[in-house]
Amino acid sequence: MLWAVVAGAGIKYVLNEGLARWQLATGETLLEGALTRLGGRLAAPLRLAFLAYFLAWSFLVAAALMSACGAVAHAILPLAGSAAADKVLYGLIHSAAGLALVRLGGFRLFERVMGAAIVLMFATVVASAVWVAADWRAVAAGLLVPRVPDLPGATGWTVALMGGVGGTLTVLCYGYWIREAGREGPEALGLCRLDLGVGYAMTALFGIAMVIVGGTVEVSGSGAGLVVALADRLEATLGPAGRWTFLAGAWAAVATSLLGVWQSVPYLFADQWRLLRSGRSEAARGAGPAVDTVARPYRWFLYALATIPAIGLVWSFSLTQRLYAITGALFMPMLAAALLALAARPRHIGQAHRNRPLTNVVLAAILVFFTLLLWQALS
């Protein structure tokens, strides 16, 4: 399954480069462009349909991240006795901590915390994979030979893996982050391509490492207790250092994911709220962030994101993760279609910045591939 990780990271690079190029060339985020330029007479119903999808996805991703944080924290320090109870308790604690960091620290603190946690996450999980990987020929085969295991539900998990690695609907948030960083105009595209390339290369390596750890170490267990079983098995194989190295990286991975979603997804709601009310983007090019993080739409959605999805903490751990990843993967063909409709046409983006022919081919392949895989997984 390693090929699916690499393919997923590559797909996310192509999609993110397209939305960055669109924004730097037009001054609009891709969400603004799609919701104001596409649809014709169907524009209003399409906006409402996307908002409904966005709200459902937000609930699932928040529930999945709280659940994942709870499961890993239970493996580090059990509190309530059972994995299920700790998943709820720790999930709520992580949600509250993420809310406080976003509200009190702003974008700059968010950047610093994410940077430190990502270094920890990357170093520890890659080290764990190197320790446990005994058959490097099998690793190479998994990277180079695309195949789906002949197992029940394998197609759904393949979609989940490719759709989930490197973000799903959250790739749209990159546009708001580069606004916060003050990047404007086509001259900033080279820098965006550089940090996207480095970021997705690290994402691919991290994903490969996680699959190696999960596929090499045999464990028994299910639900939130599976993380404990995996950590125990690593300790038996590698000693206490192996256990704590893996748990530190796993915690950094899920905690940064939660913090990133808490900080960035309210941008998307606030932007949709503004566009639904005004009908057109009111942000002038170069005027700075179009979303006011102090205004009510951003704050209210942040509070809702950090509280309402806690209902999902009582669901099955694996079911929550799979529902979130497949629902997120539904966005991949939508995003590819939007980039083909907007960034391939000079009248929208300009002749100099439109998609190259190869980019259009890749986007069309993403559209067809994910549509067929999702149809097969859901049928």
Image: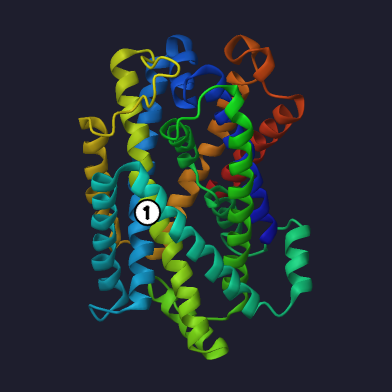
What is the secondary structure assignment of the residue under circle 1?
helix
Q: Residue at x 35, y 13 (%)?
A: 279
Q: From this viewpoint, is residue 148 visible?
A: no
Name the spot of residue 66 as percent of width and height, x first: 33, 58
Q: Residue at x 39, y 27 (%)?
A: 49
Q: From this viewpoint, is residue 103 visible?
A: yes
Q: Is residue 215 left or right of residue 167?
A: right
Q: Is residue 6 left or right of residue 269?
A: right
Q: Is residue 250 left or right of residue 267?
A: right
- Going by the numbered disc 1, the residue's amino acid type is Leu
**Relative to residue 71, is residue 182 depicted above or below?**
above
Q: Is residue 351 left or right of residue 299?
A: right
| Residue 339 lies in quadrant | top right
Name the spot of residue 293 as percent of width and height, x first: 28, 34
Name the spot of residue 261 as percent of width and height, x first: 38, 47
Neighbor class of circle 1 (other Cα within 10 Å; few <14, some 14-19, many 20+) is: many
Which residue, given by chain and number where applicable, does mark 1 sit on? 258
